Amino acid sequence: MTPVGPERVAFLGLGIMGSRMAANLCRSGFEVVAWNRTPERAQELAEAHGAQVAATPAEASSRAEVTITMVVDGPQVEAVLLGPDGAAEGMAPGHLTIDMSTIAPESARGIASRLQEREIGFIDAPVTGSRPKAEDGTLTIIAGGEEADIERARPLFESMGEVLVHVGPVGHGQTAKLLNNTLAAINTAGVAQAIATARRLGLDPERLLEVVAAGSGNSTALALKGRPMLDHDFDPLFKVEHMLKDVRHCLDTAAQADVPFTLADAAKPLYERAAAAGPEGRDFAAIIEIAEHDAGL
């Protein structure tokens, strides 16, 4: 049965995205109990937005009806939910878990199955939009799960995003997100190589971007990453390591269905090199350095 009124929410994972999403829940009037691996992040949310702080995921979920996870990858989601002091230890039957991380679809289905044994609902609901949209609550949320669970979570989703797409059963949210991010990776690599080629040929890349922005080569990748690549501004909106992780997951998922994805195959080593070049934590616009190197610049 759907509870009446705002639900208490445990929010686990307060990184670049999660801290801003949790802040929007607080601003919308939800009672948020926060946990983060580094407790200082949770304390900052408490001081700025009135959230409560929990010492463990289990403690956070025991004080809520809905638990949201926003961490890096499948192993972290599994540890936070199902490991020692994991959130599942604090959940009663009827609790709803929403994973908003980006993980492999098979990981989402496996976690959902284990939670279902405890009569706990699960939605995989990764997001797209990066830091600015997380901050202003305009993310796109890509949800996989039961219709009743999606409707129960809708007020929470509406506090964090402006577009909600229910794409199918558990696992389909992750599949759609990985395909989206892999397209972004491919497009951004193309923009990087075009900029590097322009410079090598003596063409002003500023003028190139002006032409492309008004032409058929325009893209969100150009709009978001063109200027940072020209300026070598790698302040992280979405880390290169995370983009590489998503491309790898996408390729693994496609391979399981025996589907070729040759452009993703070509993009993956470029992001591997960008991640290896370091330092860790740079935005994936750092792919421009690989394109410049290959162009002999």
Image: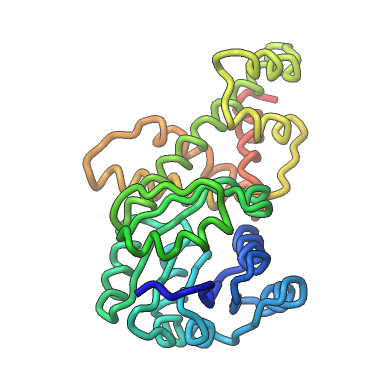
Q: Which of 88 and 221 is in front in this view?
A: 88
Residue 40 visible in the current orientation: no
User: Can you give x and y, in whole percent of width and height, for residue 48 in the image?
Assistant: 76, 71
Compared across the picture, whether 186 is left or right of 147 comes to right
Quadrant in the picture for residue 15: bottom right
Residue sitting at the far left: 258
Residue sitting at the far front: 4
User: Can you give x and y, in whole percent of width and height, for residue 269 in the image?
Assistant: 48, 39
Compared across the picture, whether 297 is left or right of 84 comes to right
Q: Residue at x 51, y 58 (%)?
A: 157
Q: Which of 46 and 269 is in front in this view?
A: 46
User: Can you give x and y, in whole percent of width and height, for residue 146 in the image?
Assistant: 30, 60
Compared across the picture, whether 210 is left or right of 3 comes to right
Q: Residue at x 68, y 29 (%)?
A: 226
Q: In this view, does 168 lie above or below 121?
A: above
Q: Is residue 5 above or below residue 183?
A: below
In the picture, which quadrant includes the C terminus?
Answer: top right
Q: Which residue is drawn at 68% across and 12% down?
A: 201
Q: Residue at x 45, y 40 (%)?
A: 180
User: Can you give x and y, in whole percent of width and height, for residue 267 in the image?
Assistant: 47, 35
> What coloring was used for the rendering?
rainbow
